[in-house]
Amino acid sequence: MTTSLSSTEPRTDEEIQAELKASGEIPRHIAIIMDGNGRWARKHGKRRVAGHRQGVESVRDITEACAQLGVEYLTLYTFSTENWQRPKEEVSALMQLLVHTIRREARTLQKNNIRLTVIGEVTRLPEVCYRELMEAIHLTRNNTRMTLNLALSYSGRQEILYAVRSLAEDVRAGRVAPEQIDEHLFEQYLFTKDMPDPDLLIRTSGEYRISNFLLWQLAYTEIYITEQYWPEFRRNELYEAIRDYQRRERRFGRVTGE
């Protein structure tokens, strides 16, 4: 893209976003494994909860940037079912932070036309967390600019097992014939039935695994790994992940040129 700015002149955020939109496809759905809050805190001599608090700032910045770029869905791996096994003090601090964040951000999401949704076994959340979450979801239910989807108390394996059980019950009840079962039908039983599969998965902190996250949905997703801890990951790092995505050729198992 041609520009009147010299290569040494800093570009504004708006100019960078315009360049990204002009240079290639913006992912319709971005999923992020937000890893490294505890290691960031240790690196800076702070308690683990300080890393989680700083991570919230990254969530705010990335959500805003995605909405500005035209991303339709942003799914954040917020709390896994395995996270319930962490020390009680840390889990309690995380739940308190979740309540505080939802209360603080719900009106901002509403103002910016962003819909909040959730996937996972959210009934396991403390009552106050569940109530605040449901209120925010209800408040933003009609928003259309972007969907912010939180994976809370989530497990990819449990999601698939839940789908299999639900489908088996419908077969037993005669609502579904076995020969009707295909990928499209099965996907209607997943938590993510109302959204497309992620185009891009970002994982922070340099770990090379997907940690039981969206196991079905990530079949053809492009994966971007960064060494940065989540509290350090802000919009400039997001832009680099999207640039990397735009340089790739997505073939979905087909030969180039088909």
Image (cartoon, rainbow, N blue to C red):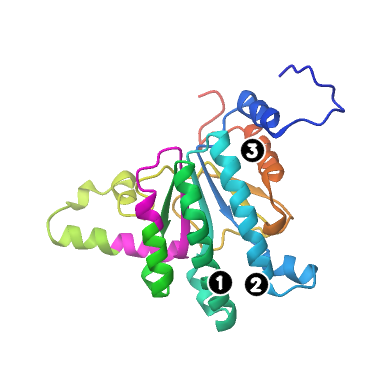
Q: Position of residue 43 (x, y in %)?
A: 79, 68
Q: How many residues crowd around disc 3 within 10 Å: few (fewer than 14), some, or many (20 or more)?
A: many
- Picture quarter containing residue 56? bottom right
| Residue at image point 26% right, 61% down | 166
The tag on residue 49 is 2
| Residue at image point 67% right, 44% down | 235
The CA distance from mark 3 to mark 1 is 29 Å
Above or below, 206 against 16 in this view is below
Q: Which amino acid type is marked by label 2?
A: Val
For this rendering, which residue is in front, 192 or 149? 149
Chain-order first, disc 2 or disc 1: 2
Q: How many residues crowd around disc 1 within 10 Å: few (fewer than 14), some, or many (20 or more)?
A: some
Q: How many marks?
A: 3
Tag 3 residue: 242
Above or below, 38 against 64 in this view is below
The tag on residue 94 is 1
Whether label 3 touches label 2, CB < 8 Å: no
Chain-order first, disc 3 or disc 2: 2
Q: Position of residue 245 (x, y in %)?
A: 63, 37
For this rendering, which residue is in front, 161 or 5? 5
Residue 87 visible in image: no
Judged from the image, the secondary structure of the residue bearing numbered disc 2 is helix
Q: Say which of marks 3 and 1 sits in front.
A: 1
Judged from the image, the secondary structure of the residue bearing numbered disc 1 is helix
The tag on residue 166 is none
Q: Residue placed farthest to the left in the image?
A: 174
Q: Position of residue 145 (x, y in %)?
A: 45, 37
Q: Which amino acid type is marked by label 3?
A: Ile
Q: Which amino acid type is marked by label 1?
A: Leu
The CA distance from mark 3 to mark 2 is 29 Å
Q: State which region is magenta.
A: 136-164
